[in-house]
Amino acid sequence: APAGTRGISLFLVPKFLVNADGSLGARNDIGASGIEHKLGMHASPTCTMVMGDAGGAIGYLVGEENRGMACMFTMMNQARLGVGIEGVGIAERAYQQALAYAQDRKQGRAPGTKSDTSDAIIVHPDVKRMLLQMRSMTAAARSICYATAVAIDVSERAENAEIQGKATARAALLTPIAKAFSTDIGNEVASLGVQVHGGMGFIEETGAAQHFRDARITSIYEGTNGIQSIDLVTRKLGANGGESVWSLLEELSGIVDRVEASNDPAFRTTGIRLRDALDSLGRASRWLLEKLGSAPNDALAGATPYLRLFGSTLGGCMLANEALAAKDQVDDDKRYITLARFFAENVTVQSSSLERTVIDGADAVNGADAILLA
Amino acid sequence: APAGTRGISLFLVPKFLVNADGSLGARNDIGASGIEHKLGMHASPTCTMVMGDAGGAIGYLVGEENRGMACMFTMMNQARLGVGIEGVGIAERAYQQALAYAQDRKQGRAPGTKSDTSDAIIVHPDVKRMLLQMRSMTAAARSICYATAVAIDVSERAENAEIQGKATARAALLTPIAKAFSTDIGNEVASLGVQVHGGMGFIEETGAAQHFRDARITSIYEGTNGIQSIDLVTRKLGANGGESVWSLLEELSGIVDRVEASNDPAFRTTGIRLRDALDSLGRASRWLLEKLGSAPNDALAGATPYLRLFGSTLGGCMLANEALAAKDQVDDDKRYITLARFFAENVTVQSSSLERTVIDGADAVNGADAILLA
């Protein structure tokens, strides 16, 4: 076989062989050894598989010889959105648990009151902030994952070739963001869930710590979030002169137009933050595109903050879009508006800083050896 | 005893009683039960203590009756800086381990090369970024903790009453920042340490996960970081019309003057970021001071982003101050300058966003019930 990844083939190696008549045959020469002690995901054991201790295992080639890496990427590409949803799922569970605890746990009194009895901790602005942060980040990640799923569906089912082509490009663009941004959020939300529980959060019995432990792998497997960021910058932004980014930015700008036109005072800062973020994302994208050609290491140095900038902007626009829909369609639209507003004021607001980090940061990153290897 | 915390007294309850002649006496009626299963800190068991199962334990009053809460705060105040240093210590260990791994672990090739053999992952800009983030955040937290320790020393030893008074105010101001900012950083750095290790980081044997688990308690105990933020805003900023904040800002401005005057091109963005951050911190401080009187819940809603803004600005100035000293005194000043620059471009740069979050964010936070309780 060729050297390296070009010589990898995929085999199915069953635990039991199958007799010619279809009945269960002999035990195959394969077994698990060395089950790993992992930080989390304890319901999904990871272990070394040992083959050939008793003469040799029988395996069946799947697909073509030397095409194992390509087969693996079929799984990997599917799994990326799946892992993003895993981040959303852990975040949602962590939020629900923290919300219930904050309504139950009594400690201190509401600011400015002097009651003899304690209040539930949810009365404290800092606890409200943590819960809103959890809820709004989870909602933003969920929206991005759903938009990715829609793009994949359309790319597979559309009968119009142009629509299909655009959806394929959209799905390709959104997948690394859905994976990395949602799993970063899964980790952040699970950590806030521990924090809302205070000291009890550190006790495994409470359950908050398990989300924190489980979530940690999602930023790593199926391509680390650093790899997703590099994929976003080099392959997705880099394709067709950034065409799929420009067309998405145009759509998002339409949402922000409607936020601005709504003249709802509760939307005022939301509109400002989203417009600023779109401008930052546009400038950072153009800068990276130019560097991809002239100084690729400078583009690579900014990949991670660029993905965060993209997710913060996209998530903010999607929550605003949901709030606009709620204003038209439901009575209790206030919660959608507050959620969009909180996300814009607390997460999307970081876009201008992230733009500066992308554009200014490459020199220090690529000069890091002076420190790291000193 | 009075109700609530005013009726708490502190007792010493020994495991063994002492006979009149000083020899070891009978076993006291106290024992541990229910050792907790904790996320981390497994070398420090936490358990329920049971007294009186066999007739009653003998305890000795420490200090005055009903003054137990005050005694506890003697420990707590000391512990806050200690826990901040704990954050720094875990971060430093996580960094050293990640740096060693990144130099050892081979995967992929340096961007733009086509060698037959793999390179160590430290060649990748995204890995350099993670390591610099770890190192610069650790260095900033360490500087803040040291400055706090200096202020405490001067407050205890200075013979001049004015110097002593200023040092006391400085120590009081810096303590919640040293505790909360350093432990937040401990968590962030430990998490990056796992990330640098990739899948191996999720395996307990590697050791990276232990730092991640251990660090998690430091944001919680000896007053959660939310409590530190509230202390910073209400008691420390709120004292004497913000006097201790204004005098610190003036000192920091002197550092930034020298950064700007250095005319070193590597310092250019550092000076811009630090000046912007000082302006943001000043505006946010004035806004909070005004709200403390007129709308305390609005001030409380911004406490956590305010502490982050404070730490990011202070840490950035202190690293720049170290770089200025290095320029005067050592040959390899480049690593100090790069470290200060990276922190300014990646962490301090968030100050303007944090200012906006403090000032704009209160409405959404205090209107959270529309979402949380819907």
Image: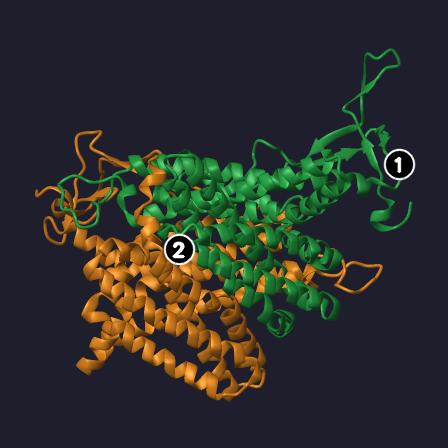
Chain colours: A green, B orange
Question: Which residue is found at the position 36% from the left and 58% from the top?
Answer: B360
Instruction: Name the residue nearer the viewer: B276 or A316.
Output: A316
Q: Is residue A106 left or right of residue A86?
A: left
Q: Of tags 1 and 2, which is closer to the observer?
A: 2
Q: Which numbered tag is attached to residue A268?
A: 2
Considering every residue shown, the one lying at the far left of the view is B1
Local crowd size for mark 2, using a 10 Å CA cut-off: few (<14), some (14–19), many (≥20):
some
Residue visible at 56% across and 55% down in the picture: A308
Residue at 64%, 72% in the rendered image: A369
For residue B32, what is the image quadrant? Answer: top left
Question: Please, what is the three-letter code of the amino acid marked with disc 2?
Answer: Arg
Number of numbered discs visible in the structure rendering: 2
The percent position of residue B296, horizontal first and vertical second, equals: 22, 56
Residue at the image point whose x is 83% and y is 62% from the top = B114
Residue B301 appears anywhere in the view: yes
| Mark 2: secondary structure | helix
| Residue A311 circle label | none
Give the image location of residue B124, x and y in percent.
69, 62
Question: Residue B338 in the image: x percent, y percent?
Answer: 56, 75
Residue A66 in the figure: left or right of residue B338? right
- Residue type at mark 1? Glu
The chain that hosts pointer 2 is: A
- Against B4, is A345 above or below? below
Q: Which mark is residue A64?
A: 1
Q: Is residue B222 visible?
A: no
In percent of width and height, residue A85 lies at 58, 38
Q: Which label's residue is closer to the chain start, 1 or 2?
A: 1
- Same subunit under labels 1 and 2? yes
